[in-house]
Image (cartoon, grey):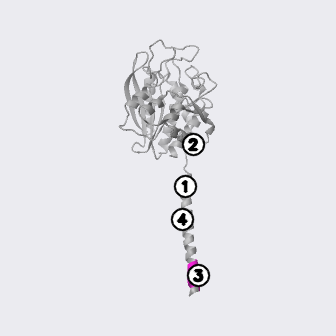
Amino acid sequence: MKYIKYTFLIVLAFFVSGCGNEEKKQSNTKKEEVKKIVVPSFNEDSAYVYVKKQVEFGPRVPGTKQHANTAKYLENTLKSFGASVIVQNGKVKTFDGKTFDLKNIIASFQPKATKRILLAAHWDTRPFADQDAKDKNKAIDGANDGASGVGVLLELARQMSLKNPELGVDIILFDLEDYGQPENSKFPEMRDSYCLGSQYWAKNLHVANYRPMYGVLLDMVGGENVFFTQEEVSRTFAPQVLEYVWQKASQAGYSSNFSYEQTPAIIDDHYYVNSIANIPMIDLIHRDASSLSGFWKHWHTHEDKLENIDKKSLKVTGQVLMQLVYTE
């Protein structure tokens, strides 16, 4: 009987071991399934078309027909992707004493989801080319400074209409970002003359107690060899977001475009989202140490036109956002 019992114990041990191995296999399988999350491929050609369409309207200067037509196009395009769209209207005064009706265009995907992120860009264009040697009082096309970030977000929206992310995503296209006071202005100095749309939104949130996990601002993301650094406002207000996005960039294969170099503060839309709305937001803005401004070489000039948009840079920016949206 001892022999029989011994044999039984061996069989039982083998059975238990087998069950344990099976559980381990199932556990490993589940882990593999988690690792096999498929992130859609960002279509840079489509994003480029969205940039081109905006430029074709003409300079999107507040108060013009071109501005009004572009606003309607952006609203309708986002609605066509199934987003819940709000146009936030407000009145703001610019440094030159003019009053404008602003339109912040806000699109929400998975509006009922409590876990949310905020992605933003500005859609207006600068009414003068203060960094150019000629035609300084003529509006710029704003292909990169404005349209590139919007183009990337429109393509992201199209992708989300094809494959719903698990988290909620809010896209905000800020108005009147680029009507800031030039350095050589003859008007009295106006503090906070830039980013009027984001200032207005931060003081008048479109949803009461709106609290996304974090935000990412896109500004000039379509220039050749796009290069992002870690600027001071982002480091001060949202260091964890910076690190997280840089990790996602590495996962997407674009670590060479996302430098850990620390650069000075930039007063951009993210500053007001951080300081007024208290939402941690970083700024992805092209930096170029070889240019006089430190920004993209065609910043605030008439060379900010469609022919200087690089589809590869749109791909870099867009794919990193896809990584954020689909692997959160």
Residue 56's disc is none
Query: What residue is disc 1 on?
Result: 33
CA–CA distance between discs 3 and 1? 38 Å
**Sequence-first disc among 3 and 2:** 3
State which mark lies toward you, 3 or 4.
Answer: 3
Query: What residue is disc 3 on?
Result: 7
Helix, strand or loop at mark 1:
helix
Residue 247's disc is 2
Q: Position of residue 139 (x, y in %)?
A: 51, 18
Could you tell me if the residues under marks 2 and 4 are in contact, i.e. CB atoms within 8 Å?
A: no
- Crowding around mark 1 (Cα neighbors within 10 Å: few <14, some 14 to 19, many 20+) is few
* Number of marks: 4
Identify the image quadrant of residue 249: top right
**Sequence-first disc among 1 and 2:** 1
Q: Is residue 313 magenta?
A: no
Indicate the amino acid at tag 2. Gln
CA–CA distance between discs 3 and 4? 24 Å
**Sequence-first disc among 3 and 4:** 3
Residue drawn at point x = 42 percent, y = 39 percent = 108
State which mark lies toward you, 1 or 4.
Answer: 4
Indicate the amino acid at tag 1. Glu
**In this picture, residue 65 sits left or right of residue 291:** left
Toward the viewer: 315 or 13? 13
Q: Where is the N terminus found, in terms of image quarters?
A: bottom right
Prevailing SS of the magenta stretch: helix
